[in-house]
Amino acid sequence: MNNPLFRPPAEADSLILQVDQGCPYNRCTFCGMYRGVQYRRLDTTEIRRLLDGAARHAAGVRRIFLADGDVMRRPFAELRAILAELAVRFSDLARVNTYATGSAIAAKTDGELAELRALKLHTLYLGLESGDAETLRRVRKGEEIETMIGAAARAQAAGLRLSVMVLLGLGGRERTREHAAATADALNRMQPRLLSALRAIPVPGTELYDDVRAGRFAQVSERGAVEELRLMVGRLELTNTVFRANHTSNVVPLEARFPRDKAVLLEQLDAVLAAGGLDAAGPGPQPLWL
């Protein structure tokens, strides 16, 4: 396949199997990952051919990541068949991880989620992006907040681990406080085991990029992104969550465990803000790659 391949940073050491091509939704204004890629689910013959090649060259693999954008969207029977086939081909396999949307999780019954977990499905990466309904509407996320929160609860009740991603600055300057506060409130209800905060970066080829260039979307400043994170962290009441903001898009790299490190994390953010080195007028340096 010549299509682009994306995976979470934590899957760097996993075997990546592209059982889908593209994203079944692919309309978020901020995401350029699968623009130009026609969504397609590989059929049974194609998947077996893919697994034949992987099994020959990746003996002993323990972790597999199923790509592309929302493999959890597949019908339950197809997911079950893929996971069962992986267990046969890779005898040392310990876990299978994938991207998932709230609506895709919600489409599975509790029994189906439990069965997928028994077949070594382990971590679902869910992009909450924002807990602010107006921000989600503006960026055409296509997901309801309550659906994502409910899906998180049901997935975790089935034994699946949830890794949630949020995007700093997604509400722009206009909704920065609403975005931060509502996102923290949604996360408090979700209680994910893993939480990642990235910064929304306008990517060429996306509507967000066009809106920034045309002056229709005012990006938060470099300082504003840290202030937004400070507000969000201050409202978080998480009981057992590993937090990371160490993606290349972030202004400062941070790692913490909630609730133990919350006070230290707030002190770190306050120190960065007090140092006065952040750009308060513009977004600051933008990463060359994401």
Image (spheres, grey):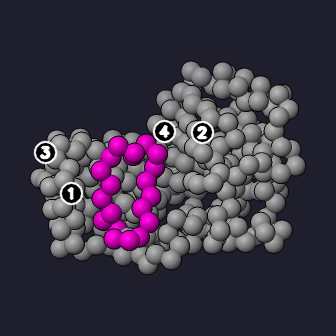
Task: Name the image quarter holding the N terminus.
Answer: bottom left
Q: Amino acid at mark 2?
A: Ala
Residue corresponding to mark 3: 91
Instruction: Check whether the beta carbons of the residues at disc 4 and disc 1 lie within 8 A of each other.
Output: no
Sequence-wise first label, 1 or 3: 1
Nearest the viewer among 16 and 237 is 16
- Res 265 → quadrant: top right
User: Where 13 falls versus 48 (above or below)?
Assistant: above
User: Where 226 falls versus 135 (above or below)?
Assistant: above
Task: Tell me the mark number nearer the camera, choosing from 1 and 3.
Answer: 1
Q: Secondary structure at mark 1?
A: helix
Sequence-wise first label, 4 or 1: 1
Q: Amino acid at mark 4?
A: Leu
Q: Amino acid at mark 3?
A: Ser
Q: Which residues are magenta?
A: 1-20
Residue corresponding to mark 4: 194
Residue corresponding to mark 2: 245
Nearest the viewer among 239 and 2 is 2
